[in-house]
């Protein structure tokens, strides 16, 4: 894959605009705030690297004190665009979540395999609650039923990048979510 010097040139179509994302993130922040009684701690657990942009905007949209922690997990191998189903924790939480309200912040839910594993893993740490907030939900590819509390946008089965989502570590900095041109990834997933 060779990314263009201008990342916008590699986008087939803009799926979700910067303005639509900003408006929905504000709504999600208000919804998360309203879901917990005043005074109860909320810990946003960002699943790196893709959700980093989303969690940064989301935490600023929640009108109360929140904490963040970071986890990095991998279920992809060898440049693949498909989840292997085998999850490895590359970076664990830095603090305790025992007795706390945890919101897993994810960029996109695809098959659900990684998030299913991560939810079970975090529930084993004895939090008060574990809920999920995702920017993008792609139900057409779901292999495991995942109870998602907050969804930004439901999207079709397209290869998307931008607003934190990447392909080969490119395109994360786009302020919108766009569909990547098929010729840039087709050889990797076995398409013509």
Image (cartoon, rainbow, N blue to C red):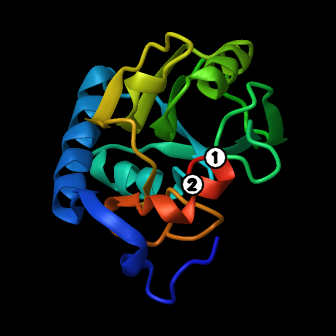
**For the residues marked 2 and 1, what is the alpha-carbon distance in whole angstroms?**
5 Å
> Residue at point 16% right, 52% down?
23
Give x and y (percent) for residue 4: 51, 83
Q: Residue furthest bottom?
A: 5
Instruction: Determine which quarter of the picture holds residue 33.
Output: top left
For the N terminus, the quadrant is bottom right
Q: Which residue is most to the front? A: 192
The front one of 172 and 150 is 172
Q: Is residue 50 left or right of residue 14?
A: right
Q: Give the labeled residue for mark 1.
A: 189
Q: How many numbered tags mark residues here?
A: 2
Asked whether the viewer can see residue 21, the reply is: yes
Q: Secondary structure at mark 2?
A: helix
- Horizontally, residue 190 falls left or right of residue 180, namely right
Rate crowding at label 2 as few (under 14), some (14 to 19) or many (20 or more) other CA atoms within 10 Å. few
Rendered position, 123 above or below 140? above
Q: Position of residue 72 (x, y in %)?
A: 72, 45
Q: Quadrant of residue 86?
A: top right
Q: Are marks 2 and 1 in contact (CB under 8 Å)?
A: yes
Residue at 26%, 61% in the rendered image: 14
Secondary-structure class at tag 1? helix
- Identify the residue at horizontal 23%, vertical 64% (top origin): 18
In this rendered view, identify the residue nearer to me: 17 or 120: 17
Q: Which mark is residue 106?
A: none
Identify the residue at image location x=34%, y=60%.
178
Task: Estimate the x, y position of residue 27 in percent, counting from the top left.
Answer: 19, 41
Task: Examine the rendering and report whether any part of residue 40 can be seen.
Answer: no
Q: Which mark is residue 186?
A: 2
Give percent across and percent down for residue 115. 60, 25
Residue 97 to residue 60: above or below: above
Mark 1 closeness class: few <14, some 14–19, many ≥20 residues within 10 Å: few
Front one among 185 and 103: 185
């Amino acid at each position: 894959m060779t990314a263009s010097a201008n990342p916008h040139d590699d986008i087939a179509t803009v799926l979700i605009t910067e303005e639509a994302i900003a408006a929905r993130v504000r709504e999600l922040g208000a919804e998360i705030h309203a879901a917990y009684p005043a005074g109860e701690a909320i810990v946003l657990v960002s699943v790196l690297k893709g959700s980093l942009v989303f969690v940064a905007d989301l935490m600023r949209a929640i009108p109360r004190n929140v904490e963040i922690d970071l986890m990095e997990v991998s279920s992809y191998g060898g440049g693949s665009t498909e989840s292997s189903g085998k999850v490895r924790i590359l970076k664990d939480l830095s603090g305790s979540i025992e007795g706390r309200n945890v919101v897993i912040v994810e960029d996109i839910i695809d098959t659900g395999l990684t998030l299913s594993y991560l939810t079970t893993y975090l529930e084993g740490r004895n939090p008060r609650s574990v809920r999920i907030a995702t920017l993008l939900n792609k139900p057409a590819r779901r292999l495991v039923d995942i109870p998602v509390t907050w969804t930004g946008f439901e999207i079709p089965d397209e290869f998307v990048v931008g607003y934190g989502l990447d392909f080969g570590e490119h395109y994360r900095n786009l302020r919108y979510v766009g569909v990547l041109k098929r010729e840039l990834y087709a050889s990797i997933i076995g398409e013509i």
